[in-house]
Image: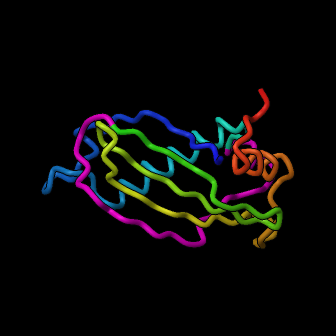
Amino acid sequence: MKNRFEVPLVIGEDQLDSEYLHLHHAEIYRVLERVRLQYLEGLGVPQEELLREDCFLVLAAAETEFLREVKAGELVGSVQVTSCSETGEVVLEQELFKAPRRLAVRATFRLVAMSGARRRRVSLPKRLFLAFSRDLEGEKSPG
């Protein structure tokens, strides 16, 4: 069974759209990105290390369902790998839950590995591919 990474989040009033008093969809994408970055850290492959290796995980496609309004307060963000390829592509399913486990946002992101210097798609670094593969198979990452 696939692993699901979860992280608690707090949405502050300062993050809300001043007119509607809820989290604007663009801000929701920022929150989902924050969860993805924490997920990479949890895998032992933080984004900063990938950038030093000239590997950028670039958004290639996104599909998002906004199911409930998100206001200030506590949320749970989750990430789950649904597929990965050593050739440089990973698909992640992400969700944001309002308490108590009420699904507010569901998104699927297809990310590709790119070299900033060469401006071309590259293979995933081996350790990142292995970490995604372990997660996909439901194994615990070492460390």
Q: Which stretch appears magenta? A: 47-74
Magenta-drawn stretch contains 59: yes
List the single residue furthest toward the front.
Answer: 1
Position of 95 compared to 80: left or right?
left
Magenta-drawn stretch contains 57: yes
The residue drawn where x is 69% and y is 40% is 46
User: Which colour assignment does the render follow?
Assistant: rainbow
Please state the horizontal and vertical placement of residue 53, each as a whole percent of the image: 81, 50
List the single residue furthest toward the left.
Answer: 19
The residue drawn where x is 79% and y is 31% is 142
Q: Nearer the viewer, residue 53 or 31?
A: 31
The residue drawn where x is 42% and y is 48% is 31
Position of 49 compared to 104: left or right?
right
Q: Is residue 105 above or below residue 14?
A: below
Where residue 59 sits, quadrant-wise, is: bottom right
Please state the horizontal and vertical placement of residue 136, each as a whole percent of the image: 70, 51
- The C terminus, quarter of image: top right
Please state the horizontal and vertical placement of residue 118, each as a whole percent of the image: 81, 69
Please state the horizontal and vertical placement of residue 106, each as a whole percent of the image: 41, 58
Position of 78 compared to 92: left or right?
left
Q: Is residue 126 above or below residue 38?
A: below
**Figure label count:** 0
List the single residue furthest toward the top.
Answer: 143
The residue drawn where x is 26% and y is 49% is 70
